[in-house]
Image (cartoon, coloured by chain):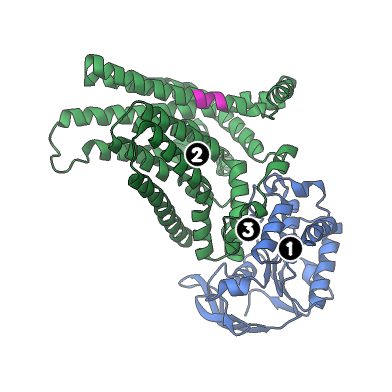
Amino acid sequence: MLLFFSSALIAFITPYLLFPDPYAVILQLGNRGSSGIFRHILKRTGAVQSGAVVVIGTVCFGDISSPLTDLGSKLLYFAAGSFFFIGLMGISISLYTRSGEKSRFWKESEKGRKLRADVGEYFKYPIDPGSIPSFINTVIVGGMGMIGVSVGAMFYSSYGSLYELIPAVVFLIAATVLMIRLYKHLVRDFYSTHAFFNEFFGETIAGKEAESKIKVEQLWWVPGAIKSHVWATLLQLDRKFPAGRVLLIGHLLIWLLSYQRPAEQTMISAWVLFAIFHHAIIIISLSDEYAPAWFRRWLGSAFQWTLVRVWIQFRWILILALSIWVNSLIFDHVSYAAQGGIILLYIASAAIISLIATFYQKATT
Amino acid sequence: MIELNNITKQFKAGKLVFSSVNETFRKGEFIGLTGPNGSGKTTFLRLLSVNSFPTSGYITYKNMNIHENPQAYLKDVGLVHDQESLPVHLSAVELLEWVLRSRNLWSELSEKEINDIFDRLSLLDDRNEQIGTYSTGMKKKTQVAAAFITRPKVLILDEPLRGLDSSTRGEVEKMLVEAKSRGALILMASHTADVNAEFVDRTLEFPLS
């Protein structure tokens, strides 16, 4: 289940981790070659990769009452999980880093313009053709991961636990091959993709968006003292990060899981993990690009900013509560008490993460 | 209005920026800060904007220690920071709306006031585009507009004219004179001749002796 979620996470998070790269100017000043940029990319994704390996290790070896029992199986699961995550992340890094040129073609060419007009006419909704290569990469990486998990489970039930390693090893080999290919033209591909994402996220506020953007008056659920901060933060987050779509995929995955009728404890764990996963948005909102340190200090207090980060998370609470409730009505998985507990945990974890974020910002500015 | 009491700032032991500074800045005064690069002008203004803390001594505003009550002090302050760092995913118009609303100054006239100030600063159609797409000069205009839109009692300006074209510089100078005439205290750093204009009351020469 953890790997299933990881696949979706890797598919979505990779471009946001890497592009546009705030250190691109420094890399250019140092005129770094392929090896320098390669190390830089590994460093920027290293925290996520090593964090994932630690989580997988904790899950596999967390049974401290009998640490040596089934050690062979535990090592096997640890290897399968780690290879799977690192391999899929490598594939994702390689695909996204090479996507700049194709994305620019669709965004700037006549063919792209025609596609935008046709699709806009057909669906009555404007799409940016420049986002198509990224969307395809998301589907490929997410799909590969989910298929990998399913194939691994099938091998396990048919041939035994050792065979569960096969998809993970295949991912690792594929990532190595793709990375070698990426390395050859890394400097060109890296700057090309950086430039594309830089321009893409600095996009013109198109007519449609200008009409549909959040208005301060719509935020009736926010206290007056922090309303303007919540408004400006949500407005910027919506422009940079498609959180709604990411969370929708999360809901779909959990519903897919519940369809397989797992035990109540498994479903509660899934909802708890998903509830905490929402707060990745708080981490994203800490970036200076949403409000530099001097600007934060100028407009509000540390207490206000802590509250702001909790309040932006209330946007998703009703959908989460509704999804758990309807899901439990249909599949009879989670008791009302547990549902309440998950929602309380959602609020408490938002408050704790926001408080830690405040101390982190105080310490680093 | 603002008093500096025995202010000493050093970045590390032995690396003194200035020592035991005592100054009083009054309402309606225009203080120019001049001196070469690295002489401490920006550090001085960062202390006054609570973006830096003194090694020793204290600064008061209306008898209130500004480093102990930053929010109460900063609501009266307009800032042009030394770097052009601003929230990049908002437009300049939205940024000013944020600044006004956060100070409970939003009214039905605010949209017009925002458009008027950008007209004065010649930030035309781009005022509705994301700040991340702006040039250095356009970011500076946005900072200047954000500093002036609240009609602050104190203006702390670090090189506000740098990167601006000549006609906009003239307009900012007019805005400075207007602010001074309504009683605002202005502290403005520059290493060019800007601060030698006739409306400067007093010049602080850096490094401070």
Q: Quadrant of the N terminus of chain A?
A: top left
Q: Are marks 2 and 1 on the same chain?
A: no
Mark 2 secondary-structure assignment: helix
Please report whichever mark, 2 or 3, sits nearer to the chain's N-terminal start: 2
Q: Position of residue A38 (x, y in %)?
A: 47, 33
Q: Chain of mark 2?
A: A
Q: Residue at x 62, y 42 (%)?
A: A239
Instruction: Say above or below: A256 vs B8.
Output: above
> The magenta stretch spans which residues?
A135-139
In the picture of the structure, the residue carrying the numbered disc 3 is A228
- Which residue is more in the foreground, A327 or A124? A327
Q: Which chain is green?
A: A
Q: Answer whether residue B112 is magenta in the image.
A: no
Mark 1 secondary-structure assignment: loop
Count of numbered marks: 3
- Residue A121 position by quadrant: top right
In the picture of the structure, the residue carrying the numbered disc 1 is B160
Instruction: Say above or below: A318 vs A361.
Output: above
Query: How far apart in space, not on screen, are marks 2 and 1 (Cα)?
Result: 34 Å
Instruction: Say above or below: B184 vs A153.
Output: below
Q: Main secondary structure of the magenta part?
A: helix
Q: Which chain is blue?
A: B
Task: State the residue lying farthest toward the top.
Answer: A158
Q: In screen coordinates, is B194 left or right of A329?
A: right
